[in-house]
């Protein structure tokens, strides 16, 4: 039987699912929830697990739009994910006291580890993960080889983070092997296809901008996802240039610690050596001052959420005129969008938060370059996008435009 590829909900940004089957095996890639605000729709794709007989579910990275439905997957099906992905997801569930989800994520028989460049065989399907730059760490693109097809599933990606250079290196060296190993089908994300004109800063630019800002502002509250390793690293590095540590509640600290112990072992860029859990009244050993006194003296970058509970933190330092930085997608603040978050919007307004953010996704030019370099022979399947049609307007070769499947 020829290889069959099925895409569910590829025409939305969150929750798309890809099924790849041969006569002997079937794998599922990602099983997430759609992004907030899409009422009326089921959160996860309707998959008849009984009927599908999936042999394994592979997760590209930890974002909820790729993993959020994992609890619905029948327990006999193994779940493949990176070890940091597992740990980051576990930190979230522990903080939220979601015991059932935490116990699945702790089950070493159920969760099988994915490692960059380590081939996994499921029947006659061979899958090789390659690490890719994204606003999540431990994110992969998958090269899937079946007896009659070579398929590249990009996952979510970009090339403007600290690991961005790897994108085209990996494609050249390992995926197409300088053209010696042609890809038949390219399945690529297209988040930014519906966000034209969004200026894309590199993480390094973000860090330099933060450094310039911190020159005169040493007391900083940061609205940023606690799993966005690169952006956290950008602000952490800018702060540590002036001796300011990074702080967060016990949950944020658990994520920073996970990154310190994994990514931080590879490069000092991610070491979060001066990251701490907020305990304002804690007496710092040997310094005869409390943590709050130390924060006042040395400055800080404190990761918060835009909820009333954190207003108390900001007000505690009101006499020092702290600043608030908004480092998340602008769309959450725009009332006409489904993803609008009113509470966050009001918080940002109240504290005149300074927008400083870079996207987790590749802009259109980079998607075009990926397509040109991979140069698939049979098909290009856009997923994770609200503008699949826009792929036909990309600067790609004519013969590639003709094989885009909408
Ligand atoms: Zn993602
Ligand atoms: Zn995504």
Image (cartoon, rainbow, N blue to C red):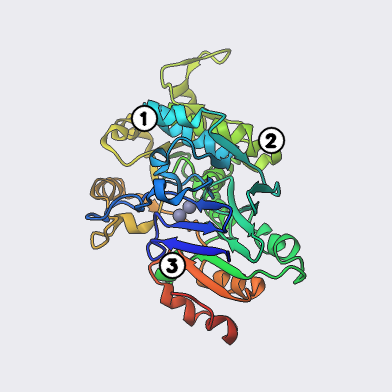
Q: On the image, numbered disc 2 is attached to which residue? A: 265
Disc 2 crowd, CA 10 A, few/some/many (<14, 14-19, 20+) = few
Q: On the image, numbered disc 1 is attached to which residue? A: 96
Tag in front: 3 or 2: 2
Within the image, what quadrant is residue 306 found in?
top left
Instruction: Check contact, mark 2 vs mark 1: CB within 8 A.
Output: no
Vertical side of 315 occupied by 55: above or below: below
Instruction: Please tell me which residue is depicted at 76% across the width and 65% down the height of the picture.
Output: 177
Q: Note whether residue 272 is visible.
A: no
Instruction: Check contact, mark 3 vs mark 2: CB within 8 A.
Output: no
Which element type, helix, strand or loop, lies under badge 3? loop
CA–CA distance in space, label 2 to label 1: 28 Å
Q: Report x, y in % for residue 371.
A: 59, 73
Q: Report x, y in % for residue 32.
A: 41, 49
Work out whether residue 300 or residue 35 is closer to the camera in this orientation and state it.
35
Instruction: Please tell me which residue is depicted at 51% across the width and 63% down the height of the picture.
Output: 5
CA–CA distance in space, label 3 to label 2: 33 Å
Q: On the image, numbered disc 3 is attached to which residue? A: 198
Instruction: Please tell me which residue is depicted at 39% across the width and 28% down the height of the picture.
Output: 100
Vertical side of 225 occupied by 196: above or below: below
């Amino acid at each position: 039987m020829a290889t069959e590829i099925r895409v569910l909900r590829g025409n939305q940004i969150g929750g798309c699912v890809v099924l790849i089957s041969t006569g002997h095996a079937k794998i599922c890639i990602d099983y997430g929830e759609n992004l907030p605000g899409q009422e009326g729709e089921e959160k996860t794709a309707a998959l008849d697990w009984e009927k599908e007989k999936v042999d394994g579910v592979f997760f590209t990275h930890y974002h909820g739009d790729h993993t959020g439905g994992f609890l619905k997957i029948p327990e006999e099906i193994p779940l493949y994910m990176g070890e940091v992905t597992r740990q980051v997801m576990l930190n979230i569930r522990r903080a939220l006291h979601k015991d059932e989800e935490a116990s699945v994520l702790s089950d070493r028989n159920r969760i099988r580890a994915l490692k960059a460049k380590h081939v996994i065989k499921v029947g006659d399907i061979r899958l090789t993960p390659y690490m890719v730059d994204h606003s999540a760490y431990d994110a992969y693109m998958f090269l899937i080889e079946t007896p009659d097809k070579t398929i590249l599933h990009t996952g979510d990606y970009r090339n403007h983070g600290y690991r961005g250079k790897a994108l085209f290196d990996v494609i050249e060296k390992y995926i197409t092997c300088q053209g010696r190993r042609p890809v038949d089908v390219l399945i690529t994300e297209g988040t930014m296809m519906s966000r034209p004109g969004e200026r894309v800063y590199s993480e390094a630019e973000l860090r330099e901008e933060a450094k310039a800002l911190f020159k005169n502002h040493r007391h900083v509250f940061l609205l940023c996802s606690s799993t966005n390793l690169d952006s956290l690293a950008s602000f952490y590095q800018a702060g540590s240039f002036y001796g300011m540590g990074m702080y967060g509640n016990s949950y944020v600290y658990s994520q920073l610690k996970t990154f310190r112990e994994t990514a931080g072992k590879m490069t000092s860029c991610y070491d979060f050596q001066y990251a701490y859990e907020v305990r304002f009244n804690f007496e710092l050993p040997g310094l005869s001052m409390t943590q709050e006194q130390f924060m006042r003296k040395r400055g800080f970058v404190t990761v918060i959420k835009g909820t009333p509970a954190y207003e108390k933190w900001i007000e505690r330092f009101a006499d020092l005129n702290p600043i608030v930085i908004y480092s998340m997608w602008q769309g959450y603040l725009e009332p006409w969008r489904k993803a609008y978050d009113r509470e966050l919007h009001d918080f940002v307004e109240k504290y005149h938060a300074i927008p400083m953010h870079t996207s987790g996704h590749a802009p259109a030019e980079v998607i075009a370059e990926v397509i040109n370099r991979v140069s698939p022979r049979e098909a290009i399947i856009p997923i994770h996008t609200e503008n699949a049609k826009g792929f036909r307007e990309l600067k790609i070769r004519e013969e590639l435009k003709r094989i885009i499947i909408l």
